[in-house]
Image (cartoon, rainbow, N blue to C red):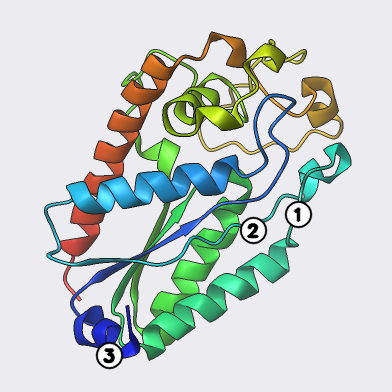
Amino acid sequence: MTRDEISAIAGDALVVLPVGTTEQHGPHLATGVDAALVEAVAEQAARMAKRPDVVLLAPTLSYGASDHHLPFGGTLSLHVATFQAVLRDLLGSAAACGCRRIFVLNGHGGNTPSCATAVAEAAREHRLLAATALFSQLLDPGTLELHVSGHAGVFETALMLALHPEQVRRDLATPSPGGAARERARGLVVAEPGRWSELDGYTDHPETASEELGEMGLAAVTASVAAAFEEVADLAL
């Protein structure tokens, strides 16, 4: 779209900024998984959402905070402070374009604190109605009979089989030597040194993923994201 076309709709649109990463996803998935998944989910949810009338989809930010994956290779990371500064600049730019509502749709758990900080700052500094969510966390527990949390496990592998099967090395998908991501008390965050090495950089059972599971997962998560878009669209400015 041109500058004039964007300016004409910016004030009434919900602007969606998908953010992902470029990072290792075990031996069986390509490094662009988070960016590819969040872009597909954002696009499909934007089409599905009944409100607002206009959703303006920004280009996907394919780099995020992934320093914990650097030891494995195949990772291009921004430091947390750098990533927050990038988001701050992008949200400020959106405000300068006349945007009033923006949704930062996140595809990588390591980005979550920075996204939350960025939208809070944008609301305060630019009077934007700004929201964010990690798309997998918008699913109600029990919606899918598979392990949704984790990294490069059954959930992400299944979604990639449904969307980009050529980026999945099925013969290399094996159980993580460290098992699933550990369940914590609700709200508890624990950083364990050496845990990613134990896991070999991925979690749970990617070998159990299938295209059918991926299609079910994609439909469920897209519906949840579309509902979140509608919820933000309904909020008063």
- Residue 110 placement, left or right of 225: right
Q: At label 2, which amino acid type do we have?
A: Tyr
Q: Earlier in the sequence, mark 2 or mark 3?
A: 3
Mark 1–mark 3 CB contact (< 8 Å): no
Q: Quadrant of residue 131?
A: bottom left
Mark 1–mark 2 CB contact (< 8 Å): yes
Q: Percent x, y for residue 218?
A: 35, 31
Q: Quadrant of residue 62?
A: bottom right
Determine the CA span between mark 1 and mark 3: 34 Å
Q: Is residue 179 above or below residue 58?
A: above
Q: Percent x, y for residue 91?
A: 46, 77
Determine the CA span between mark 2 and mark 3: 28 Å
Say which residue appears at 54% left-offset and 49% top-offset. Answer: 35
Q: Residue under circle 3?
A: 4
Q: Is residue 94 above or below residue 235?
A: below
Q: Residue under circle 1?
A: 76
Q: Percent x, y for residue 51?
A: 13, 58
Q: At label 1, which amino acid type do we have?
A: Leu
Res 216 visible: yes
Say which residue appears at 77% left-offset and 12% top-offset. Answer: 177
Element on which disc 2 rests: loop
Q: Residue under circle 2?
A: 63
Q: Earlier in the sequence, mark 1 or mark 2?
A: 2
